[in-house]
Image (cartoon, rainbow, N blue to C red):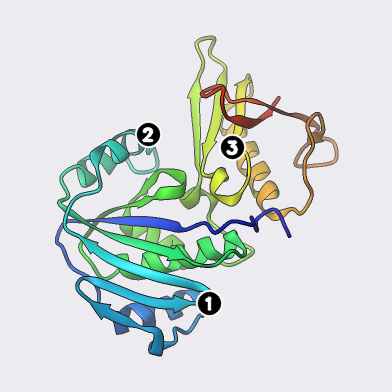
Amino acid sequence: MTQNQPDEQRPLLAMIALNTPSLPSPVVLTQDFKALSGISVDLTSLQSKNGNIVFEIGKDNAAIALMPAPIPWSNLEGPCATAWWWPDATERMKYHASHILVALVGDKGDLIQRSINLTHLTAAVAAHVDAAGIYWGGGTLVHDPQVFVEQAKEISPSNFPLHLWIDFRLEQNDDDSYRLFTTGMKVFGHKEIEIPHSTKPPAEVFDFAQAIAAYVLTSEKTIQDGETIGRSEDEKVRVSYTPSMWDASITAMQLDF
Protein backbone atom coordinates (compact mmCIF):
# COMPACT_ATOMS: atom_id res chain seq x y z
CA MET A 1 0.00 0.00 0.00
CA THR A 2 1.50 3.35 -1.03
CA GLN A 3 1.27 6.44 1.12
CA ASN A 4 -1.61 7.89 -0.87
CA GLN A 5 -3.73 4.78 -0.42
CA PRO A 6 -5.06 4.86 3.15
CA ASP A 7 -6.97 1.86 4.36
CA GLU A 8 -10.15 3.76 5.19
CA GLN A 9 -12.71 5.09 2.76
CA ARG A 10 -12.40 8.85 2.27
CA PRO A 11 -15.22 10.78 0.59
CA LEU A 12 -13.90 13.67 -1.49
CA LEU A 13 -15.97 16.85 -1.65
CA ALA A 14 -16.19 20.13 -3.53
CA MET A 15 -18.94 22.75 -3.53
CA ILE A 16 -19.96 25.19 -6.24
CA ALA A 17 -21.58 28.40 -5.00
CA LEU A 18 -24.33 29.51 -7.37
CA ASN A 19 -25.68 32.87 -8.46
CA THR A 20 -28.64 31.07 -10.04
CA PRO A 21 -29.78 27.62 -8.85
CA SER A 22 -29.53 25.01 -11.62
CA LEU A 23 -27.88 21.73 -12.58
CA PRO A 24 -26.26 20.93 -15.91
CA SER A 25 -27.75 18.40 -18.32
CA PRO A 26 -26.55 14.93 -17.21
CA VAL A 27 -25.61 14.05 -20.80
CA VAL A 28 -23.61 17.26 -21.30
CA LEU A 29 -22.00 16.79 -17.89
CA THR A 30 -20.79 13.27 -18.63
CA GLN A 31 -19.58 14.30 -22.10
CA ASP A 32 -17.54 17.17 -20.64
CA PHE A 33 -16.16 14.95 -17.91
CA LYS A 34 -14.95 12.49 -20.55
CA ALA A 35 -13.42 15.31 -22.58
CA LEU A 36 -11.47 16.50 -19.53
CA SER A 37 -10.53 13.16 -17.99
CA GLY A 38 -10.61 10.64 -20.82
CA ILE A 39 -12.91 8.50 -18.67
CA SER A 40 -16.16 7.24 -20.21
CA VAL A 41 -19.15 7.13 -17.89
CA ASP A 42 -21.29 4.00 -17.97
CA LEU A 43 -24.63 5.63 -18.76
CA THR A 44 -26.47 2.59 -17.38
CA SER A 45 -25.33 3.79 -13.94
CA LEU A 46 -26.65 7.33 -14.53
CA GLN A 47 -29.62 8.49 -12.45
CA SER A 48 -31.08 11.98 -12.45
CA LYS A 49 -34.00 13.02 -10.28
CA ASN A 50 -35.05 15.43 -7.54
CA GLY A 51 -32.10 17.75 -8.03
CA ASN A 52 -29.50 14.97 -7.95
CA ILE A 53 -27.29 13.36 -10.57
CA VAL A 54 -25.59 10.08 -9.66
CA PHE A 55 -23.31 7.80 -11.69
CA GLU A 56 -20.22 5.63 -11.34
CA ILE A 57 -16.62 6.65 -11.98
CA GLY A 58 -14.55 3.52 -11.61
CA LYS A 59 -15.07 2.26 -8.06
CA ASP A 60 -16.45 5.61 -6.91
CA ASN A 61 -20.03 6.79 -6.85
CA ALA A 62 -20.22 10.36 -8.13
CA ALA A 63 -23.02 12.50 -6.73
CA ILE A 64 -23.98 16.00 -7.87
CA ALA A 65 -26.69 17.52 -5.68
CA LEU A 66 -28.41 20.90 -5.90
CA MET A 67 -28.70 22.38 -2.41
CA PRO A 68 -31.29 25.15 -1.83
CA ALA A 69 -29.16 26.96 0.78
CA PRO A 70 -25.80 28.74 0.59
CA ILE A 71 -22.53 27.25 1.74
CA PRO A 72 -22.31 28.48 5.36
CA TRP A 73 -20.41 31.76 5.41
CA SER A 74 -18.54 30.54 8.50
CA ASN A 75 -16.87 27.99 6.17
CA LEU A 76 -16.07 30.57 3.49
CA GLU A 77 -15.14 33.79 5.32
CA GLY A 78 -11.58 32.80 6.23
CA PRO A 79 -10.72 31.12 2.91
CA CYS A 80 -12.13 34.08 0.96
CA ALA A 81 -10.22 36.61 3.05
CA THR A 82 -6.89 34.83 2.55
CA ALA A 83 -7.30 33.89 -1.14
CA TRP A 84 -4.53 36.15 -2.48
CA TRP A 85 -4.84 34.40 -5.89
CA TRP A 86 -8.46 35.60 -6.14
CA PRO A 87 -8.88 39.11 -4.67
CA ASP A 88 -12.61 39.24 -5.53
CA ALA A 89 -13.44 36.05 -3.62
CA THR A 90 -15.40 37.67 -0.79
CA GLU A 91 -17.38 39.95 -3.09
CA ARG A 92 -18.18 37.12 -5.49
CA MET A 93 -19.15 34.46 -2.95
CA LYS A 94 -20.66 36.23 0.04
CA TYR A 95 -24.20 36.63 -1.26
CA HIS A 96 -24.82 33.37 -3.12
CA ALA A 97 -28.08 31.66 -2.11
CA SER A 98 -27.61 28.06 -3.25
CA HIS A 99 -24.87 25.63 -4.13
CA ILE A 100 -24.04 22.31 -5.75
CA LEU A 101 -22.40 19.56 -3.75
CA VAL A 102 -20.00 17.44 -5.82
CA ALA A 103 -18.83 14.23 -4.14
CA LEU A 104 -16.92 11.04 -4.84
CA VAL A 105 -17.39 8.19 -2.38
CA GLY A 106 -16.79 4.45 -2.35
CA ASP A 107 -13.23 3.89 -3.53
CA LYS A 108 -10.30 3.26 -1.18
CA GLY A 109 -7.68 3.67 -3.90
CA ASP A 110 -5.22 6.27 -5.09
CA LEU A 111 -6.24 9.61 -3.62
CA ILE A 112 -4.32 11.63 -6.19
CA GLN A 113 -6.21 10.02 -9.08
CA ARG A 114 -9.50 10.37 -7.21
CA SER A 115 -8.74 14.06 -6.58
CA ILE A 116 -7.98 14.51 -10.27
CA ASN A 117 -11.34 12.89 -11.06
CA LEU A 118 -13.13 15.19 -8.60
CA THR A 119 -11.39 18.23 -10.10
CA HIS A 120 -12.46 17.25 -13.61
CA LEU A 121 -16.00 16.51 -12.43
CA THR A 122 -16.28 19.82 -10.56
CA ALA A 123 -14.97 21.69 -13.61
CA ALA A 124 -17.46 19.90 -15.87
CA VAL A 125 -20.32 21.00 -13.60
CA ALA A 126 -19.05 24.56 -13.10
CA ALA A 127 -18.69 25.13 -16.83
CA HIS A 128 -22.46 24.80 -17.31
CA VAL A 129 -23.94 26.66 -14.35
CA ASP A 130 -23.96 30.27 -13.12
CA ALA A 131 -21.18 29.72 -10.60
CA ALA A 132 -20.09 32.35 -8.08
CA GLY A 133 -17.11 30.36 -6.80
CA ILE A 134 -15.75 26.94 -5.97
CA TYR A 135 -14.95 25.69 -2.46
CA TRP A 136 -12.51 22.77 -2.29
CA GLY A 137 -13.38 21.09 0.98
CA GLY A 138 -10.22 19.11 1.68
CA GLY A 139 -7.97 22.16 1.57
CA THR A 140 -10.58 24.73 2.64
CA LEU A 141 -9.74 26.73 -0.50
CA VAL A 142 -11.86 28.92 -2.76
CA HIS A 143 -11.33 29.43 -6.48
CA ASP A 144 -12.62 31.55 -9.33
CA PRO A 145 -14.78 29.15 -11.40
CA GLN A 146 -13.41 30.23 -14.78
CA VAL A 147 -9.82 29.87 -13.62
CA PHE A 148 -10.60 26.49 -12.03
CA VAL A 149 -12.14 25.19 -15.27
CA GLU A 150 -9.17 26.37 -17.35
CA GLN A 151 -6.63 24.86 -14.97
CA ALA A 152 -8.54 21.57 -14.85
CA LYS A 153 -7.84 21.18 -18.57
CA GLU A 154 -4.09 21.04 -17.89
CA ILE A 155 -4.20 18.24 -15.30
CA SER A 156 -2.58 14.86 -15.77
CA PRO A 157 -1.22 12.22 -13.36
CA SER A 158 2.22 13.80 -13.81
CA ASN A 159 0.91 17.38 -13.59
CA PHE A 160 -1.55 17.57 -10.74
CA PRO A 161 -2.69 20.90 -9.31
CA LEU A 162 -1.47 21.20 -5.72
CA HIS A 163 -2.58 24.85 -5.69
CA LEU A 164 -6.19 23.77 -6.31
CA TRP A 165 -6.16 21.18 -3.53
CA ILE A 166 -3.85 22.45 -0.80
CA ASP A 167 -3.65 25.85 0.87
CA PHE A 168 -0.04 26.98 1.33
CA ARG A 169 -0.59 29.81 3.79
CA LEU A 170 2.38 32.16 4.06
CA GLU A 171 2.44 34.76 6.83
CA GLN A 172 4.95 37.17 8.32
CA ASN A 173 6.11 36.73 11.92
CA ASP A 174 6.57 39.64 14.31
CA ASP A 175 10.34 39.56 13.75
CA ASP A 176 9.86 39.96 9.96
CA SER A 177 10.66 36.30 9.29
CA TYR A 178 8.06 34.12 7.57
CA ARG A 179 6.03 31.08 8.51
CA LEU A 180 4.11 28.72 6.27
CA PHE A 181 1.55 26.03 6.94
CA THR A 182 -0.62 23.82 4.77
CA THR A 183 -4.23 22.75 4.87
CA GLY A 184 -5.17 19.76 2.75
CA MET A 185 -2.34 17.24 3.19
CA LYS A 186 -4.42 15.35 5.76
CA VAL A 187 -6.92 14.36 3.07
CA PHE A 188 -4.12 12.42 1.36
CA GLY A 189 -3.18 10.62 4.57
CA HIS A 190 -0.18 12.83 5.38
CA LYS A 191 0.79 15.30 8.08
CA GLU A 192 0.31 18.96 7.36
CA ILE A 193 3.55 20.79 6.53
CA GLU A 194 4.74 23.70 8.67
CA ILE A 195 7.73 26.03 8.41
CA PRO A 196 7.51 28.02 11.66
CA HIS A 197 10.37 30.42 11.06
CA SER A 198 12.31 31.23 7.90
CA THR A 199 14.45 34.22 6.99
CA LYS A 200 14.48 33.28 3.31
CA PRO A 201 12.45 35.30 0.76
CA PRO A 202 8.73 34.44 0.86
CA ALA A 203 8.69 33.18 -2.75
CA GLU A 204 11.47 30.72 -1.92
CA VAL A 205 9.63 29.50 1.18
CA PHE A 206 6.49 28.98 -0.88
CA ASP A 207 8.30 27.16 -3.70
CA PHE A 208 10.14 24.91 -1.25
CA ALA A 209 6.93 23.92 0.55
CA GLN A 210 5.19 23.10 -2.73
CA ALA A 211 8.11 20.96 -3.89
CA ILE A 212 8.19 19.02 -0.61
CA ALA A 213 4.42 18.53 -0.65
CA ALA A 214 4.60 17.13 -4.18
CA TYR A 215 7.40 14.77 -3.15
CA VAL A 216 5.53 13.57 -0.06
CA LEU A 217 2.37 12.88 -2.09
CA THR A 218 4.11 10.93 -4.84
CA SER A 219 6.92 9.14 -3.02
CA GLU A 220 6.51 5.69 -1.50
CA LYS A 221 9.28 6.49 0.98
CA THR A 222 8.28 7.35 4.53
CA ILE A 223 10.25 10.32 5.82
CA GLN A 224 11.36 9.65 9.38
CA ASP A 225 11.67 12.11 12.24
CA GLY A 226 15.12 13.69 12.21
CA GLU A 227 15.85 12.92 8.56
CA THR A 228 16.70 15.61 6.04
CA ILE A 229 14.92 16.42 2.82
CA GLY A 230 15.54 18.81 -0.06
CA ARG A 231 15.06 19.62 -3.71
CA SER A 232 18.60 18.54 -4.58
CA GLU A 233 21.38 16.39 -3.14
CA ASP A 234 22.99 19.49 -1.67
CA GLU A 235 19.86 20.86 0.04
CA LYS A 236 19.37 19.20 3.43
CA VAL A 237 16.45 20.46 5.54
CA ARG A 238 15.74 18.72 8.82
CA VAL A 239 12.31 17.15 9.32
CA SER A 240 10.69 16.83 12.73
CA TYR A 241 7.26 15.57 13.71
CA THR A 242 6.13 17.83 16.52
CA PRO A 243 2.91 19.37 17.82
CA SER A 244 1.48 21.85 15.34
CA MET A 245 2.20 25.49 16.00
CA TRP A 246 -1.58 26.04 15.82
CA ASP A 247 -2.98 23.01 17.62
CA ALA A 248 -0.82 21.05 20.07
CA SER A 249 -3.13 18.04 19.79
CA ILE A 250 -2.13 17.61 16.11
CA THR A 251 1.27 16.42 14.91
CA ALA A 252 2.71 18.35 11.97
CA MET A 253 5.68 17.78 9.68
CA GLN A 254 7.85 20.76 10.57
CA LEU A 255 10.70 21.82 8.33
CA ASP A 256 13.71 23.82 9.48
CA PHE A 257 14.02 25.83 6.29
Disc 3, SS: loop
For the C terminus, which image quadrant?
top right
In the rendered image, which quarter is residue 208 located in?
top right
Q: Which of the two discs, 2 and 1, labels the residue nearer the N terminus?
A: 1
**Three-letter amino acid code at the position of disc 3:** Glu
Between tags 3 and 1, which lies in front?
Answer: 1
Q: Residue at x 33, y 77 (%)?
A: 29
* As drawn, 210 above or below 17: above
Task: Select label 3 or label 2 by which is in front.
Answer: 3
Identify which residue, 153 or 96, lies in the foreground: 96
Tell me the amino acid under the disc marked 2: Thr
Residue picked out by circle 1: 58
Residue holding disc 3 = 192
**As displayed, is residue 155 above or below residue 234?**
below
Q: Earlier in the sequence, mark 3 or mark 2?
A: 2
Q: Which residue is mark 2?
A: 82
Check the image and name the residue furthest to the right.
233
